[in-house]
Image (tube, helix red, strand yellow):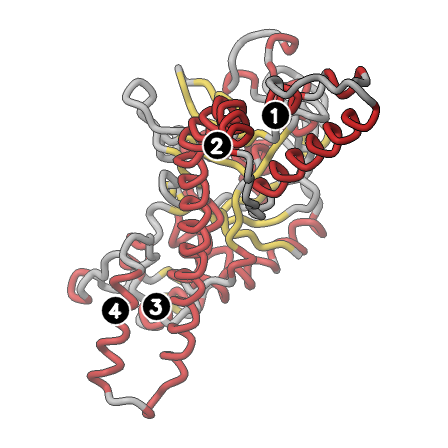
Amino acid sequence: MPRELESHPLTDLVSETPSPSSPVEEEELKARVLELSECINGLVDEQAERIDDIAVAQDMAQGVKPYIDRLIALQRLLNPVDRIIVKRDQIQELQAEIAEDVAEVEDISGDMGDQVDSPLLNDLEGEIASVKRDRKLFVSEVIDEEFDAPLQTPGPSGPQTLLQLDVPERFERILGDRFLSLSRLSEILDTPFSREFISEHNRLLDKVWNTVFETAELRPHIQRDRVKTIQKTFCDYALIFRSPQLSSGEDGAEGGVCSLENLRNHFSSFFVNTSQRSLWYTRIPFYRESISRPHWALVDRQYLNCTFKKPSIRLLMYARANELPPRLVRQKTILEDIYDRIVLELALKERFFDPCHSITSSTYQQGKKAPMKQVYSYFKDDCIRISGKRGTPHWRPTKPRWPGVLPSIVFST
């Protein structure tokens, strides 16, 4: 028998067959082995054929049984994992579909007008509200008019209402110190802005006002000059300008682009007091990335819990709940997250954002074949910490910070 046939696994199945004593018998044996091999391949391809020789069939069954048992055990092990993965993907797809369906129903209900009976329309709006119950709305409470007498600002020709003020003054009236004008930001960052730069980006505040305050939810309160109601509504919000430039800082560092590296050099007290070499993220590209375009951002103090929903789904639901274009509601990069934390704490003299594992849109790889990891930030021991892991960070009793996304409503030229 040829050497390659002697080493073939199927020879074990016909070990009791007498050895061939002539070339003819050898060819017959080779043909039989090939036939058995095709039978096994047929089983794999679900093309079962009858084996007339019972002894050979029993030998085949005994020979393949250990492998079949091993495959069945492996299948039992892997099936729950596969089901979990499939169900998770189905849930995420369903969440996206529900958010889109709710948006579509809202649009349709808004166009119905007088075509539908009022009770039916009210029922529909009630059902939509119940679906959206887990999302944060701008107006959480309306103060009665008798407790919300208009707060008028003196002007040259008498008291001025909110709409009579310039747009920057409106934001200052509503948000107070949480409106970081370019002049205040220039002092905080020690970065001078030219008059042309200030004028250009102050004009963008008109877009912020029209998008946020001219909604059907807020317009009646604005027109009635319910300043206290608007102030209470936006008590968890701040309006900041994200500058692409930095000047000298607390350690006398030279100015440059606004990057995580330069923020750490300028405001070192916010970071862990250690050498640059010992921080893992100083070797990752996002450490030196900069803010590409200057823009205004309306940021929310409260995070959106992402324990069961992806950040993208949470932000989509948030945008729809607040009548905002989804493209404006963004997940922060790690640079924007750290920038917002530092600037607002310096301006307000207190920590602004609620504690959570803030999931950012920044990702990284520590090698070409390494898995992609997500970057998130949090405060610990009065210092900003930056961590990375695959997927979403999990809540634990020993690390009681929920995974969340801090929404950012971005306005750029």
| Label 3 residue SS | loop
Q: CA gap, disc 3 to disc 1? A: 38 Å
Q: Residue furthest right?
A: 23
Residue closest to the eye, 266 or 288 = 288
How crowded pointer 1 is (Cα within 10 Å; few <14, some 14-19, many 20+) is rated as many
Give the quarter of the image for residue 279.
top right
Q: Is residue 15 left or right of residue 163?
A: right
Which is more N-terminal, label 1 or label 4?
4
| Label 4 residue SS | helix
Q: Is residue 248 left or right of residue 21?
A: left
Residue closest to the eye, 116 or 226 = 116
Which is more N-terminal, label 4 or label 3?
4
| Label 2 residue SS | helix
Q: CA gap, disc 4 to disc 2? A: 37 Å
Residue closest to the eye, 241 or 321 = 321
Q: Amino acid at mark 3?
A: Glu
Q: CA gap, disc 4 to disc 1? A: 47 Å
Marks 3 and 2 close (CB-CB < 8 Å): no
How crowded pointer 2 is (Cα within 10 Å; few <14, some 14-19, many 20+) is rated as some
Q: Which residue is mark 4?
A: 127
Q: Amino acid at mark 2?
A: Arg
Residue at left 42%, top 75%? 107
Which is more N-terminal, label 1 or label 2?
1
Q: Position of residue 353 (x, y in %)?
A: 39, 35
Examine the rendering and report whether any part of residue 342 can be seen.
no
Q: Amino acid at mark 4?
A: Glu
Disc sitting over residue 327 in the figure = none
Q: Which residue is mark 2?
A: 341
Q: Which residue is mark 1?
A: 263
